[in-house]
Amino acid sequence: MQTPERAVAWLTLCAALLLTGCASTLTAKVTRFNQWPADTAGASYRFTAPDPQRDLELQAYQGQVGAELQQLGLRPAGTGETARFVVDVQADLSERQRQRLVPVYNDQWVYVPPWRDAQGRLFGGHWVPDPLGARYVGDRTVTQTVQRSQLKLRISEAGPGGAMRMVFEATAVHEGGDDDLVAVVPYLVRGTFQDFPGANGQVRRLSFDLPAR
């Protein structure tokens, strides 16, 4: 049983939570390892061939990575040119179940029995909210479906005799409700190249402002 005043309070709280849940930010966890060489300005790069099943999609992601590489002073390898760097880009979307504990509160009511005042007037019994307020009675387990958007970037350098060695490796992950991979990847790319190449073995948690909807 709930009074109108409490109902209004709960509706106000729920509205505030909805606004908070719609906050226009995107968070990502970025893990990087590198042995980035010196004197890379003007060096050439090429991408590994994308999966034929996702050719156009991966080409779009490669274009976003390429824009960042060019900001670093690298350039796409020309036709027939042996590139110094080979870049591999992978992006995928998966789902997983996550369980968490949610507190449960019992909104207690107490019964006030009938009573008479000093003039002998009778007042009927009635229920009133517990003056101590809602009481914590335990936790319940809630299962949520979480979408996991992931970008993996690997850059290898050609050495003597054509031998390749890994010089940069990064994984950027965003977990959310129903985000589209295509909309999330640009932010994962930005996070991967933020303060490039970064410290070896570095893990960062980044937040990005999203445009208003």
Image: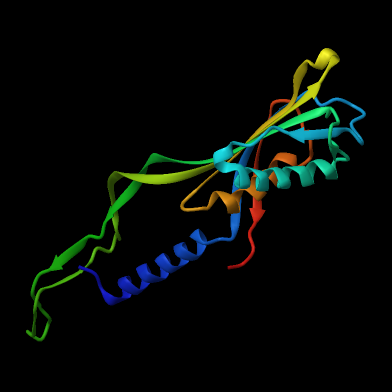
Q: How many marks?
A: 0
Q: Is residue 99 left or right of residue 25?
A: left
Q: Residue furthest top?
A: 161
> The N terminus lies in which quarter of the figure?
bottom left
> The C terminus lies in which quarter of the figure?
bottom right
Residue 60 percent location from the top left of the image: 66, 48
Residue 180 percent location from the top left of the image: 53, 52
Q: Residue furthest front?
A: 80
Q: Is residue 39 left or right of residue 83?
A: right
Q: Is residue 7 left or right of residue 193?
A: left
Foreground: 123 or 72? 72
Foreground: 122 or 45? 45
- Which residue appears at 84% of the width and 45% of the height? 71
- Which residue appears at 86% of the width and 34% of the height? 44
- Which residue appears at 60% of the width and 56% of the height? 25
Classify residue 41 by image quadrant. Answer: top right
200 relative to 204, above or below: above
Residue 148 percent location from the top left of the image: 50, 42
User: What colouring does the structure picture have?
Assistant: rainbow
Foreground: 20 or 70? 70
Q: Is residue 61 left or right of residue 137?
A: right
- Which residue appears at 46% of the width and 51% of the height? 177
Foreground: 170 or 2? 170
Residue 147 percent location from the top left of the image: 47, 45
